[in-house]
Amino acid sequence: MGDTGQVTSVQPQHGAGQTAPGWYPDPWNQSSWRWWDGLAWTANISGAIEKKPRLPMWLSMPVLLAGIPTAGALVFFAFTSSLFAVFLGLVPLLIVVPVLVWLDRVEPEPWSSRLHALLWGVTVAALIASIVNSIVALVAGEAVAAVVSAPVVEEGMKAAGLLWVVRRKEIDGVMDGIVYAGWIALGFAVIEDALYFATASQVGFLAQTFILRAILTPFAHPLFTVWSGIAAGLAVSRGKRAFPSILFGYVIAVALHMAWNGSITYSERLDEGQALAVVGLTFLLFIILFFGVGIALFVFRRREQKRFTAQVPFLAQRYGLTPGEVVVFSKWRDMLRIRSSLSRSQRKHFDGVHSSLARLALLHSRPGDVDASEEQRLAGQLDRARRAPST
């Protein structure tokens, strides 16, 4: 992918209109960045090295605190019911993860960040939702907990995970919001399925429950939460605050979740024929919704690909890409072909450069003036990604 071991960058020259305003390596101190206002260097200087977080990127304090009781609950269910049933909860990973990876190819997110989103669903979302739903079930009954409490609280905690991702500055556009929503929802589904399977194994309904939840409806939770992800991504891409903008998607997520849980709960009160009709109609409607969302995501993904490759020449001029890098990232199929031929370590380096360029492309596609501090931060990420060893 060209000479990425040596950092090159646009060096602004004095004179009006020659180089666009932006953050560039300080000509007097290459370890920091200096703002070029389009005419001359200014006094605005910022270091390119970001503050090292206290915890690894795949972990956060909420995940750590919620992970302890969650792990204890899993161990309890595994040894008091069926260890095999608990492990069956991992089956949806085999179905949903490849789809999320495919969606994320436009702007590949770090695996540490994706793992954190998954763990948020497994720990924070699942723990708080289980506590609240249990209280509601004791006070108002199982039906109210399933139809009202579960959609409101579960989607709320998954949306909170998305807001945490925005806080970490890891969502730059709609596709990021969709991908992180999918990982959070998948994490929640995994832990929920594990507990459902453990309970079902005790009453002899493990096979039926497994087929229904793991095989027929593995995308149910991602299909609900994706709307919160779309809302969060749209807000960021338009330069707005993720909250309260995310509430629009959250309302849709809750409504779909209520419709799903409500139909299942209602069918339990009917005779066998009527119950099958209600469940069958619900499945049909959600299958239509699933394919509709899938087609929309495919079209959106293709549009994002074209937008990224079209911006490569601009990114090359502004951030000093080598001719080899321009060739690699200008054609999507060639980029994927080259990536597939790389070793694992080279692929990690490749994805780092690709992700940094994609984030900068999204930044420059937002309406209004470019946020100078955000551009400096992302340019620093690109600089470090290009410096990283590729072998």
Image (cartoon, grey):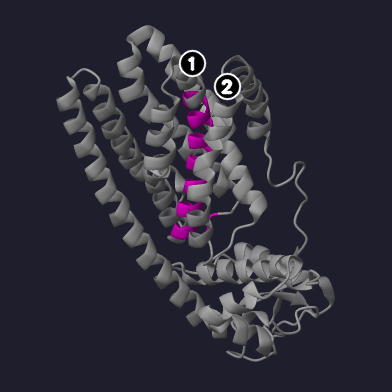
Q: Position of residue 326 (x, y in %)?
A: 61, 85
The residue at 49%/42% (across/down) is 92
Residue 142, placed above or below residue 299: above
Label 1 secondary element = helix
**Amino acid residing under circle 1:** Gln
Q: Position of residue 166 (x, y in %)?
A: 54, 49
The residue at 63%/46% (across/down) is 115
**Labels 2 & 1 near each other (Cβ < 8 A):** yes
What is the distance, in whole Å, between disc 2 and disc 1 at their CAs? 8 Å
Which quadrant is home to the C terminus? bottom right
The answer to whether residue 180 is magenta is yes
Badge 2 density bin: few <14, some 14–19, many ≥20, Cα 10 Å: some
The residue at 64%/34% (across/down) is 63
Q: Which mark is residue 202?
A: 1
Residue 57 in sight in this render? yes
**Amino acid residing under circle 2:** Ser
Q: Position of residue 8 (x, y in %)?
A: 75, 82
Taking the image as shown, residue 275 lies to the left or right of residue 198, namely: left
The residue at 35%/67% (across/down) is 299
Q: Earlier in the sequence, mark 2 or mark 1?
A: 2
Magenta segment's dominant SS is: helix
The one of 185 and 366 positioned closer to us in this rendering = 185
The one of 170 and 175 positioned closer to us in this rendering = 175
Q: Which residues are magenta?
A: 171-196
Which residue position holds label 2?
A: 82
Badge 1 density bin: few <14, some 14–19, many ≥20, Cα 10 Å: few
Label 2 secondary element = loop
Taking the image as shown, residue 192 lies to the left or right of residue 342, namely: left
Residue 44 in sight in this render? no
The image quadrant that residue 329 belongs to is bottom right
